[in-house]
Each structure stands twice: as C-alpha cells, then as structure tokens.
Image (cartoon, rainbow, N blue to C red):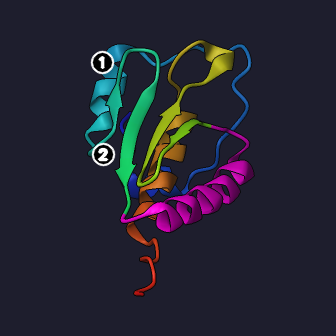
Amino acid sequence: MIKTFADLFASRCRGLEGGHAMRDEAVKAQLVELPGWRSDGKRLHRAYAFADYWETIAFVNALAYVIHREDHHPELTVGYNRIDVRFDTHSVGGISENDFICAAKCDALYAERPKAPSA
C-alpha cells in the first residue's frame, strides 16, 4: 500500500527484525511520493544542495537530531555545499518502509531549512 508524503512524515520507524525488504515494484510505486529520491535496488538515495558550508553543516546537525529520534541512521557523504543521503535497512537486507519514513523527514527538513545569513 502506497503511503502519501504526509502519512510517511507522520509515521515512526519500527523494529523490523525478521522482516523482508520491499519488492522492487513497491519501492518504485512509493518513490512517486518522494520526488528527488532514487533507488539502486538496495538503497534509497538523494543529494541535497546548499549555498555554502555553513548551510550544509547546519542541515547535517538538524538531520542528525531528527533521524536519531527514529533510530534509523543513513549513510551521509558531506561536501562543501552538498550532502548525499543513503538509506537502507540492514535487518531486512534492503529497502523498508522505515527508509521512506526517514526520507520524508529529510525532505521536510530540507524544505524548512534556514538560509545562510547574509554577509
């Protein structure tokens, strides 16, 4: 069942030990609700762009707080003005609903991020 962005954002991650990864068809269908996110078959991933290093690191710190509350941590690659975010669920060996929940929370945070102060 496809969840809307609002449903994903309102959801909380849950333990999935003994569960199964989502099928490719279900992943593709759910990705419709998260423009900008892609799947490589094993992970969800997206790049976020920023104006400068300050804005990039501010987002990383805010993201760390939000995602820690979900207890579902991404792999991050951080550059001067870019962050690559990758989610997968180790306990199921692939992509789960938890990855989509966290992706929605990342997108919401990005949409509301403060801009770098003017010099």
Sequence-wise, the earlier of marks 1 and 2 is 1
Percent position of residue 100, x then y? 47, 39
**The stretch drawn in magenta includes residue 99:** no
**Is label 1 in a helix, a strand or a loop?**
helix
Q: Position of residue 89 (x, y in %)?
A: 61, 24
Q: Which residues are magenta?
A: 51-73
Say if residue 58 shows up in the picture. Answer: yes
Task: Give the residue number, with chain letter if any, for mark 1.
Answer: 25
Question: Residue placed at 65% from the left, 42% from the top?
Answer: 13
Q: Position of 34 compared to 86: left or right?
A: left
Name the amino acid, label 1.
Glu
Q: Nearer the viewer, residue 38 or 114?
A: 114
Q: Residues within 10 Å of mark 1 (few under 14, many from 20)?
A: few
- The front one of 61 and 30 is 61
Chief secondary structure of the magenta span?
Answer: helix
* Image point (46%, 77%), residue name: 114
Residue type at mark 2: give it.
Glu
Name the quadrant of the C terminus: bottom left
Q: Which residue is mark 2?
A: 33
Crowd band around label 2 with a 10 angstrom C-alpha radius: few (<14), some (14–19), many (20+): some
Judge left or right: residue 69 versus residue 8: right
Compare residues 76 and 25 and report the one nearer the observer: 76
Quadrant (top left, top right, bottom left, bottom right) of the N terminus: top left
